[in-house]
Amino acid sequence: MADANRPLRAAAAKALLNASFALDNILDSSDDENYREASSTDSTDDTDTEDIVPLTSTPTTASTSATATQIPRQGRRGRPRLLGQRQASQPRNAASLPSWTVADDNSAPELAYRFIPARPSGVQQDLTNASVIDCFRTLVTDDIIDELVQNINDYATEKLAMNRPAKRRSRFNEWTPVNKEDILKLMAVLIAMGITKKPRMRDYWTSDAVHQTPWYGSMFSRDRFEAIYSTMLHASDVGSQGKAKIEPFVNKLIESFQAAFYPYKEVAVDEMVIGYNGKWSSKQYNSSKPSKYHIKTFGLCDSNTSYVYNLLIYFGADTSYDPELDKDCGEAVKVFHYLIKTLGPGHHIYADRYYTSLKLITFLKSHSMHYTGTLNVSRIGFPLEIKKKTLKLQHREHRNYLSEDKSILCVAWRDKKAKKYCTLVTTAHHAGQTEVQRRRETVIMPSVVANYNSFMGGCDKMDQILSYYGQYTRKTIKWWKRAFTWILEVAQANSYILYCLSHPDAKLTLLQFKNRLVDQLCEAAADIGAAEEPARRSGRPSVHLMERLSHKPHLVAHRSEARNCEVCSTPQERKRTNFVFFTTPDIDIPPAIDILPTIDIPPTIDIPQTNDIPPPIDIPPTIDIPPTIDIPPTIDIPPNIDNSTNY
């Protein structure tokens, strides 16, 4: 009897196995995202306590059940499963996740944090009577410029020592140390290059009559500019590697950014990318960004003014996160912890779905801060009804969900002509609706969506400002130089915002601000150069040649080779001469005879006005000459006739 049932048991086991494979594929495709996040959340747990659900409730024999439970198989994520059994869609710590209920338009989170800024919001200094360069020098301080001068000169000293002896036409032969005047002129030139863009750097010093721009030649010679900007520019200590090449310089600028301004209640956190196609280990790729290959930075901007308050450059594993944070807290928590460390409680932070998670919301609630952001529906812990295949919304329809503890509100809304609905999460706004005036119509939408559209664009608006006249997009092989020129552009944009806030009646565009800044930087550099002129000039004092030679023993001699005349030559035109002076210390020559003063010559005598000259006589027109008379051709003389006879 046992032998007769053996084929039946084998057939049943085979059918059960095939059914298990088919069902697992269906379940895994629907619960793929939830299972991935559940696995990553509980990866440190060694015990397997997940619920096991039977495949079917049909009663089976003992032998069939034993056979089914003794055949394990490997799940899609590497976890062992028993044949005919599947995992639950909820993670193992599902008890700690919030439960959600459908809410009406009168629902709202019960969190109410009072806004207590660390400092008064707005401009921190009195810049009412400040000029354009005063606002810029508030951010780019003297300490930053002095340190930049020191770093460039230290790097140049090491570079020169490594390249001795230099080649005949090398830049190192003509190098002289830079000073504050050179740095101000360099900044003015870089700003002007962003306004007037040319294909190559050398085109700014071209002598072509069509494209010539003489102003750049008056600031620097081409070789001097290339020596500073292309060869010797260095923003950190000599020998710095990796992020140390630029991060200290950026941090000093950020400190001045924070000292000059404090944001208002609403702030935005978003990525601010710096396009770069060169080779760099931490370069990022994102096809949805304007620059697919880029240096990624995380920025915190004031939502009302777009002022950049804090920045964090992404260096991969070397990113300057707080080392005391839990490694499993997630990248969003690490980024927010760095960006908001100088903010007081009560701020309302807006971000996109890249950051939104329950861990981040819990972290911000511990710092008494509100959060509003879009949501990736596959995130764990949020309502399962908001999945794309589950929730069906008509145009201009919305759905609200409130967490069990009434601290988080989730809103799904579908706009007109939108193919999909958007989902937002907030801890501050209520679920009501508001009217928004668009170009041609008035739209009624959830207040969460309206406020998100109003306050989320701080970082995006700053990116737009930087793209107008930015010099940082010029090609370079040094990744840190791209970040260097970009952060200087951010400093200009921030100084423009400070000027507009301090001068509300001044209607100044960004282009006008930059043009004024270039002029005032040139004036400041000229003042510094005039003050440092006596101290930095060495050698013989600047005395006129004729004064130097007066009352000195000297003679005039003639040389076969012409030389530049020291008296007649100018920087624009050289005068050559074969006569030179040479001193004779052994000959005692008496001092020159004093020349008598010149005699005053009386003014010239006024000449009386001449008589009127009569008009010229009309000359008759020339007589027409008849055409020339045709001369007949010459007569051929026969060769036998003698024509040499004299007449």
Image (tube, helix red, strand yellow):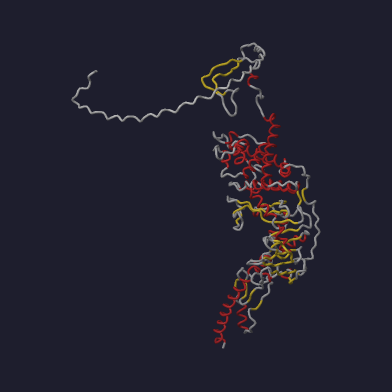
Please give the name of the residue rendered at 79% of the width and 64% of the height, measured from the top-left corner: 111
Q: Nearer the viewer, residue 491 or 553?
A: 491
- Left or right: residue 178 versus residue 15 is right
Q: Position of residue 70 (x, y in %)?
A: 61, 77
- Left or right: residue 432 versus residue 228 is right
Q: Nearer the viewer, residue 427 or 451?
A: 451
Examine the rendered structure and indicate whether residue 316 appears above or below residue 577: below
Would residue 409 be visible to someone looking at this image? yes
Q: Position of residue 436 (x, y in %)?
A: 72, 62
Would residue 150 be visible to someone looking at this image? no
Examine the rendered structure and indicate whether residue 467 appears above or below residue 579: below
Please give the name of the residue rendered at 70% of the width and 51% of the height, measured from the top-left corner: 311
Residue 646, image quadrant: top left
Q: Quadrant of the C terminus?
A: top left
Q: Nearer the viewer, residue 430 or 405?
A: 430
Q: Nearer the viewer, residue 99 or 322?
A: 99
